């Protein structure tokens, strides 16, 4: 019998990995420790994609869910932009989550198949303007359209394709996705949907995401960095 962990534990692990990744980027990038933190940081987004797909499956009001994501993305954009020194001319990952949820909604709609495919392709193209881009949209679709086991397999296949593409285009850091994606897949596999008494860690993430950037930016200003 496999061990199981609850949703809050999975989300908390994802938040810790995310913060470690951003701390490394801000304070000790290009060091061996930073390399480890960046690989750990690749755990977070896939976990977020999975929970967005789960939210779609179980939400009583998808419109309200999409609205919350859009507001969270808009609120997070300035802290995200300033964290990267004003050089991040693209949307933060919560915008990607919003687009991924929209794509999933289109995929499960009653539209004509050709129209659905065309709209989803358009969403993927538009998501290139956001962090994690089409990869995030496709991963969310995998988790949302398949059961968990098939979704994990499809996610890992997409990750492999992404690493191959990055390597082919000369991106030397594509390897960072491998351990992070494997760890994310393992956490998702361990997740026990039957656990009770969990805090609502999902919406807490809406606050943690921008607040980490604000805190790191503040420390850098006080430290004269």
Image (cartoon, helix red, strand yellow):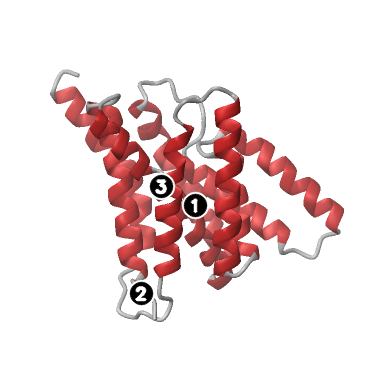
Above-or-below relation of 177 to 24: below
The residue at 51%/65% (across/down) is: 55
Q: Quadrant of residue 128?
A: top right
| Label 2, label 1: how far apart the Cα atoms are | 28 Å
- The kind of secondary structure element at disc 2 is loop
In the rendered structure, find residue 121 and report the number of the disc placed on it.
none
Residue 212 lies left or right of residue 41; in this view the side is left
Closer to the chain start, of discs 3 and 1, is 1
Q: Quadrant of the N terminus?
A: bottom left
- The kind of secondary structure element at disc 1 is helix
| Label 3, label 1: how far apart the Cα atoms are | 24 Å
The residue at 53%/54% (across/down) is: 67
Mark 3 sits on what residue? 180
Q: Position of residue 173 (x, y in %)?
A: 44, 30
Q: Position of residue 39 (x, y in %)?
A: 36, 40
Residue 36 lies left or right of residue 188; in this view the side is left
Mark 1 sits on what residue? 69
Mark 2 sits on what residue? 4
Q: Nearer the viewer, residue 4 or 92?
A: 4
The residue at 47%/52% (across/down) is: 46
Q: Quadrant of the C terminus?
A: top left
């Amino acid at each position: 019998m496999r061990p199981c962990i609850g949703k809050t534990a999975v989300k908390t692990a994802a938040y810790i990995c995310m913060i470690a990744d951003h701390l490394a980027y801000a304070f000790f990038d290009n060091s061996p420790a930073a390399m480890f933190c960046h690989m750990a940081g690749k755990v977070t987004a896939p976990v977020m994609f999975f929970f967005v797909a789960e939210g779609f499956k179980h939400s009583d009001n998808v419109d309200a869910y999409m609205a919350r994501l859009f507001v969270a993305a808009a609120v997070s954009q300035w802290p995200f932009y300033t964290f990267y020194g004003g050089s991040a001319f693209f949307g933060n990952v919560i915008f990607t989550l919003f687009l991924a949820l929209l794509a999933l909604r289109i995929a499960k709609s009653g539209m004509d198949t050709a129209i659905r495919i065309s709209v989803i392709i358009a969403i993927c193209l538009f998501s290139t303007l956001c962090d994690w881009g089409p990869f995030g949209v496709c991963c969310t679709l995998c988790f949302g359209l398949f059961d968990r086991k098939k979704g994990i397999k499809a996610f890992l296949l997409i990750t492999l394709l992404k690493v191959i593409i990055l390597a082919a285009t000369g991106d030397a850091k594509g390897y960072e996705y491998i351990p992070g994606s494997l760890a994310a897949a393992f956490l998702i596999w361990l997740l026990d949907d039957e656990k009770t008494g969990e805090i609502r860690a999902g919406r807490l993430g809406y606050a943690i995401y921008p607040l980490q950037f604000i805190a790191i930016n503040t420390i850098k200003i006080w430290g004269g960095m």
